[in-house]
Image (cartoon, grey):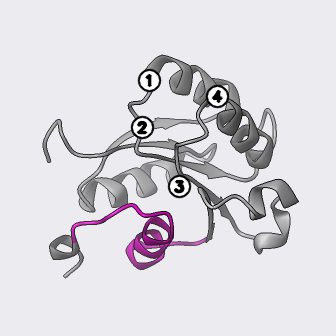
Amino acid sequence: MTDHAPLILLVEDEAMLRLAAAELLEDMGFRVETVGSAREAMAHVVAAGTGYSAVIIDVGLPDRSGAELAKDIRGRRADIPIVIASGYDESVLDGTLVGDPRVGFLGKPYGMKGLTQAFADLGIEVDRTLLS
């Protein structure tokens, strides 16, 4: 992996899931920054400017909902693709997010195939040679 690999911000409050998802993303060729709360995520988004290729947000965060965080990120960076991850179905998403072409949904538990599809739906390319 190089410093030129796309950078993903992973927002997941459960440490084991955060670690497993970060390793999976790194195996897919991404650089990953991880945080465990909405507050930390917004601080990273503000500090990174245009640095992130995508943000993956767990819907159930300790300090606010993932949907609210997604709306805040949208307000600051309308161009950044966001993937909302949840053990529930897409009905957990707010109507404004469902209609946004830069917001995708990923059901938990997820693996490389689910992440690849969620990214493809948002126009983020994954190096297919890593998926073999």
- Inspect the image, locate mark 1, and give the three-letter code of the amino acid beneath it: Ala
Give whichever of discs 2 and 3 has the lower sequence position.
3
Judging depth in this view, the residue of 86 and 101 nearest the camera is 101
Identify residue type, mark 2. Answer: Tyr
Q: Which mark is residue 76?
A: 4
Q: Residue at x 22, y 45 (%)?
A: 5
In space, the residues marked 2 and 3 are separated at their CA atoms by 20 Å
Of mark 1 and mark 3, the one earlier in the sequence is: 3
Tell me the CA gap for discs 2 and 4: 13 Å
Query: Tag 1's secondary structure?
Result: helix
In the rendered image, which residue does mark 1 sit on? 48
* Apparent side of residue 30 relative to residue 9 in the rendered image (left or right): left
Task: For residue 51, say whether it is visible.
Answer: yes
Task: Indicate the quadrant containing the C terminus: top left, top right, bottom left or bottom right.
Answer: bottom left
Mark 2, Cα crowd under 10 Å, few <14 / some 14-19 / many 20+, is some
> How far apart, in angstroms, are the residues tagged by discs 1 and 2?
7 Å
Looking at the image, is mark 1 or mark 4 earlier in the sequence? 1
The residue stretch that appears in magenta: 108-127
Q: Residue at x 13, y 42 (%)?
A: 2
Q: Which residue is mark 3?
A: 17
Residues at marks 1 and 3, CA–CA distance in whole angstroms: 23 Å
Q: Nearer the viewer, mark 2 or mark 3?
A: 2
Q: Is residue 121 magenta?
A: yes
